Image: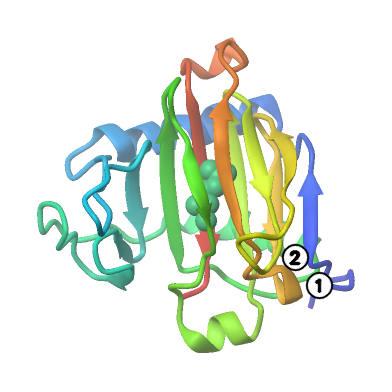
Amino acid sequence: MPAVEPAAVSWFKGYLTPDEQRALTARCLEFLNGPAGGYVPTVRGGGRMRVRMVCLGRHWNALTYRYEATRADHDGAPVPPVPEEFVRLASRIAQDAGFDVAPDVCLINEYGPGGRMGLHQDKDEGRASIEAGLPVVSISLGATARFLFGGLKRRDPVEAMLLESGDAFVFGGPARLRYHGVSRIVAGTAPPALGIDGRINLTFRRY
Ligand code: SIN
Ligand code: MN
C-alpha cells in the first residue's frame, strides 16, 4: 500500500537521476528506432500529429481512439509488452503519489523542435480504470516542454508548466480527466548526455 495519501496531482521535479535518464532514453530510442518503431499518427479528421509515437502493452489507435493489440491504423504490427523495468518504475512513481497501481500501457511520444500536442483528455482507457481515477504517470526526457494543464472542461483556464528532463508528473483521482497538452518544446534544453535534441515523453496508464 502507498505510504502517502493519494494526491490528485503530483509533480516530482528531477525524479530521475542523470544516469536513469540516460538509460531510459536509450531504451525508448530502441523502441522508437527499432522494427515497428515510432510513426506519426494521423488522427480522425485527417490531421497528422506533431509527435512520433510508439505504444507498448496496447496500441492506441489514433483513428478510432481505441486501444488494441495491433497497429491497425498504421502497419498492423503487433504491440510489444511493457518491459518489466518500465512497469516497476511507473508503479514506484504512482506509489510516491499515493496510488497503488501497476500500469499496463505505455505510450512513448517523441517531440522534435516543432513538436506539440493539442489540449485533450486521456479518456480512452477502460471505464473501471477511469472511474477509479487510476492515474496517468508521465516521465519527461530531453528538451523542456511547455505543458498545459487545464480543468475538466476544455474552456477551463490552463496553467503552463515547464516539464524538464527527469521530471515525473502524475494526475489521478479527481484530476484524472483534466485537459492537458504540450504547446511547445524549448530548443536547446536537452541534457547533452542524453544524445537527443528533442523530447521524449512516456505516459503510463492502467487500461
Ligand atoms: C500526453 O498527453 O499524452 C503527452 C503529454 C506530454 O508529452 O507531456
Ligand atoms: Mn494525454
Between 177 and 119, the one lying in front of the other is: 119
- Identify the residue shown where x is 18% and y is 45%: 36
Q: Which one is in front, 73 or 34?
A: 73
Res. 112 image quadrant: top left
Is residue 72 shown left or right of residue 143? Answer: left
Q: Residue furthest left?
A: 75
Which colour style is shown? Answer: rainbow
Looking at numbered disc 2 in the image, what kind of residue is underneath it? Gln
Give percent across and percent down for residue 125: 46, 75
Count of marks placed on residues:
2
Task: Using the rendered image of the protein, determine whether residue 182 is visible from the camera's viewpoint.
Answer: yes
Whole-percent x, y for residue 113 in the image: 45, 20
Secondary structure under tag 2 reads helix
Please tell me whether residue 129 is drawn above or below residue 124 in the rendered image: below
| Residue where numbered disc 2 is placed | 95
Q: Secondary structure at mark 1?
A: loop
Rendered view: 69 above or below 117: below
From the image, tell me which residue sits under label 1.
2
Task: Give how far across and how far down residue 76 sits, in percent.
Answer: 10, 59
Q: Residue at x 44, y 64 (%)?
A: 105
Q: Are marks 1 and 2 in contact (CB under 8 Å)?
A: yes
Please name the amino acid that badge 1 sits on. Pro
